[in-house]
């Protein structure tokens, strides 16, 4: 009868062979793409470069690695079209606006799943060598599933963290925009000045405002750039600010007064949120007090009486 270690070795060898075949397939596809890019580069060099012009510098190593990962990620159909749109919005909200960000996330998910699966399998083989093959297989598949989910969880955490940073500093940014509009700045100049001044305080908000300013200068459509700002961040507070700015921009109402009202509203919402958290604090502290503090108090109060009773019965 063949023991379980033989089947584990055979399964590991099969997975290794399959991974090598897939890697060779990906490399062949990426090699053909690189060959086409090199041919295009050579054609552009001989047709477009002027005499005495220096050759373009090679791409940095980070860019080359990103392109390779993107080529691999395009060959892994892990998401459907709806999931791709949702994850692309999350990537943009987290600050990743590269074209190949989704493909890099796909390959990162696969790598995390493979590393975690191999780590769990190796740990089981090292600490529990007598484990059955089916148990090892289930543990390996569970580790791979956890590794596939982990990058998406980290992405959602990054999105929430970035949104909190923007929401916390938004009233100060609105006050600065009020000062700029009082000084006679236009809406585009106000956005650009606010982005520059907020660079050291909140880089996330400064980055979004700078991108909004660049879009307004490139397309000459301030309304569309403001709507893109609301869609990128996904914050309700920014949606309200964008709606107010668009109405003021389209109907000619005073922007200064609207921004001042928005800043006051955001500060009131922040105070209400803090008061709500403070009101919930007493309820949240009930269980820790019952589980951690109350037993210690009972022991301190009841220990002397218990000792006296024990001495009395002992005599």
Image (cartoon, helix red, strand yellow):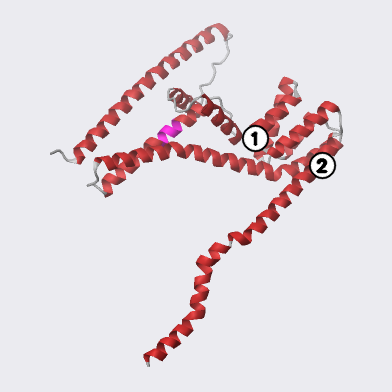
Q: Which residues are magenta?
A: 107-112
In terms of depth relative to the viewer, which is nearer, 231 or 192? 231
| Residue toward you, 116 or 310 | 310
- Residue at 84% x, 34% y: name it: 255
Does residue 217 appear to the left or right of 252 in the view shown?
left
Using the image, determine if residue 257 lies above or below residue 246: below
Looking at this view, name the residue that lies furthest to the top.
Answer: 47
Picture quadrant of residue 90? top right
Residue that protrudes farthest toward the front in the picture: 313
Q: Residues within 10 Å of mark 1 (few under 14, many from 20)?
A: many
Q: Which residue is mark 2?
A: 261
Decide if residue 114 is on the left or right side of residue 187.
left
- Quadrant assignment for the C terminus: bottom left
Decide: few, some or many residues near mark 2? Use Cα within 10 Å; few <14, some 14-19, many ≥20.
few
Q: Residue at x 61, y 34 (%)?
A: 93
Decide if residue 135 is in sight here: yes
Query: Residue 184 appears at what percent x and percent y?
Result: 86, 33
Q: Secondary structure at mark 2?
A: helix
């Amino acid at each position: 009868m063949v023991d379980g270690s033989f089947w584990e070795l055979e399964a590991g060898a099969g997975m290794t062979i399959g991974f090598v075949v897939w890697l060779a397939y990906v490399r062949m596809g990426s090699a053909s793409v690189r060959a086409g890019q090199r041919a295009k580069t050579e054609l552009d060099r001989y047709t477009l470069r002027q005499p005495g012009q220096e050759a373009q510098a090679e791409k940095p190593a980070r860019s080359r690695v990103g392109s390779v990962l993107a080529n691999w990620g395009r060959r892994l159909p892990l998401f459907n079209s709806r999931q791709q749109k949702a994850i692309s919005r999350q990537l943009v909200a987290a600050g990743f606006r590269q074209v190949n960000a989704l493909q890099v996330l796909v390959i990162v998910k696969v790598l995390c799943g493979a590393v975690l699966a191999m780590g769990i399998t190796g740990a089981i083989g090292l600490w529990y060598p007598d484990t059955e093959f089916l148990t090892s297989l289930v543990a390996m598949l569970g580790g791979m599933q956890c590794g596939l989910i982990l990058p998406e969880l980290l992405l959602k955490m990054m999105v929430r963290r970035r949104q909190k940073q923007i929401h916390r500093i938004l009233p100060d940014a609105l006050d600065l925009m009020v000062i700029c509009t009082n000084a006679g700045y236009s809406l585009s100049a106000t956005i650009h000045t606010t982005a520059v001044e907020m660079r050291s305080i909140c880089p996330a908000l400064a980055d979004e405002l700078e991108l909004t300013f660049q879009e307004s200068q490139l397309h000459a459509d301030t309304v569309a750039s403001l709507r893109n700002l609301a869609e990128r961040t996904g914050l309700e507070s920014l949606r309200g600010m964008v709606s107010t700015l668009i109405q003021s921009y389209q109907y000619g109402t005073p922007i200064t007064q609207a921004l001042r009202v928005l800043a006051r509203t955001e500060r009131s919402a922040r105070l209400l949120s803090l008061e709500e958290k403070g009101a919930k604090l007493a309820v949240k502290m009930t269980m820790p007090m019952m589980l951690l503090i109350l037993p210690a108090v009972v022991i301190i109060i009841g220990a002397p009486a218990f000792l006296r009773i024990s001495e009395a019965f002992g005599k």
